[in-house]
Image (cartoon, helix red, strand yellow):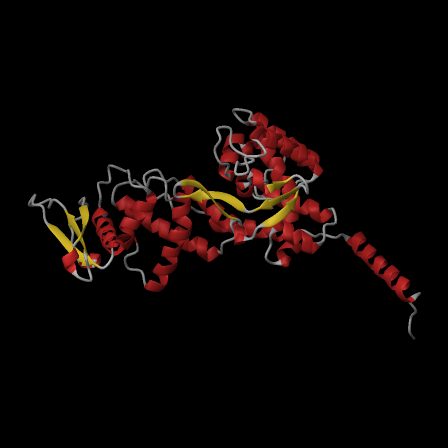
Amino acid sequence: MAESINLPVGIRLSADIEERADYGKRPFKARVRWIDPATKKRPSISEPFATREEAGEWIARLQRKAAQGIDPKSALMRLGEYGDANMELALRGLEKKTRDPYLAGWRKRVVPTLGHLSAAMITAGAIDRAVVGWISDGVSKSTVKNSLAVLVRVMEQAVRDEIREKNPAHIRGWQKLYQQIEDELDDPRSLALPNWTVLVTLADALVERSADRYRGWGDVVIFAGCTASRIGEVSGCRVGDIDTKTWTWQVRRQTTPSPGGMDDKGTKGNRARYVPLIEEVRELISERLDMIGRENLDARLFRGPRGGRIATGVLRDATHWDEVVAKLGYEHLRRHDLRHTGLTWMADAGVSLHVLQKIAGHADSRTTEKYLHPDRREITGAGDKLSEHLRSRSGPVLRVV
């Protein structure tokens, strides 16, 4: 096994796989060579395997092992590669019950959001945004803690390797942010914009503040607010997802960060859903369909000014979101609150709970119920309606003495 082979630290391996018919049940011979830093000789080791895949995995493990301690001055390794190569050092001393959730956090949270960046380029701000993204995705507090903990350990190893001067992963205040988001989600109505005029004003202000005054930024904001959707879902919307006969949008995918940049995947919970397209946004949609070409079914309905995919962070930075919303008096407003806005408006318009749940894509109706906020007059009115219903069925309601 690769773990039992003692290799010099920081060497570069050359490798090859040879298929030999005379090797019987293990015909694939994997071999690695390197230059010994002390003797300058070129030793090698080899091992036979039953499949080419097994041989390749053996070579990959040795290469990761040899990469530990690789020249820190190069600073070329991506965080994902650096962490994989140095994970044993980073997690040394931990018990298996701790290592497993750490490794899961690394694989499912850290690498998809930050793994494509150079280990030397990771900043506290980038980590902070990643953590906010994890929280917004609805993961548990323990998952955030484990994901951040393994990142702290990997970056600590980077400090020891002199790739960095200090560890940027020691961010503070995320627990408070987590609690704030939890508290806000208990009353998502408080996050909603009050009316259509404010939504349009926000969209126009964001366009005006952007460097290129790209109208598409405003279209994304209006579309997200009216459809109660996430920015990633808006980015994932294709021409073929829009039905102008029924004026509905089939939400089937979302754009999310990945090791290679931005990628499309299924919606949250992998549940496709239908969303109504109200009259106020139909002209906007029609103009975009005509501009893109209605026959281009796989084309994205919304793109950045240079044709790129839109992410919530891209929208924020391009439009100076924080500055604009603060100037308008909505300092609390995040891009995700456009979804809260749409759902609150639909609830206030009288959309029934079970329909609103389908539009939102909520697995639990208790989440949807938070958008319903009947006041006392509505409750009294509900009682009046019940009395009227009973009278129509069985005559006046008489008191039994």
Could you say which is closer to the camera, residue 318 or residue 158?
318
The residue lying at 52 percent from left, 24 percent from top is 212
Residue 60 is situated, as x and y percent measured from the top left of the image, at 25, 50
Could you say which is closer to the camera, residue 206 or residue 116?
116
Callout count: 0
Identify the residue at the far bottom of this view: 401
Residue 243 is situated, as x and y percent measured from the top left of the image, at 63, 41
Residue 120 is situated, as x and y percent measured from the top left of the image, at 32, 39
Could you say which is closer to the camera, residue 180 or residue 401?
401
Q: Is residue 384 left or right of residue 172?
A: right
The residue lying at 52 percent from left, 33 percent from top is 303
Q: Quadrant of residue 145?
A: bottom left
Residue 358 is situated, as x and y percent measured from the top left of the image, at 64, 53
The residue lying at 68 percent from left, 40 percent from top is 245
Rendered-image quadrant of the N terminus: bottom left
Identify the residue at the far top of this view: 212
Answer above or below: position of 21 versus 41. Answer: below
Answer above or below: position of 104 versus 204. Answer: below
Answer above or below: position of 259 versus 287. Answer: below
Q: Quadrant of residue 117?
A: top left
Q: Is residue 224 left or right of residue 4?
A: right
Q: Is residue 371 left or right of residue 154?
A: right
Q: Is residue 170 visible?
A: no
Q: Is residue 137 visible?
A: yes
Rendered-image quadrant of the C terminus: bottom right
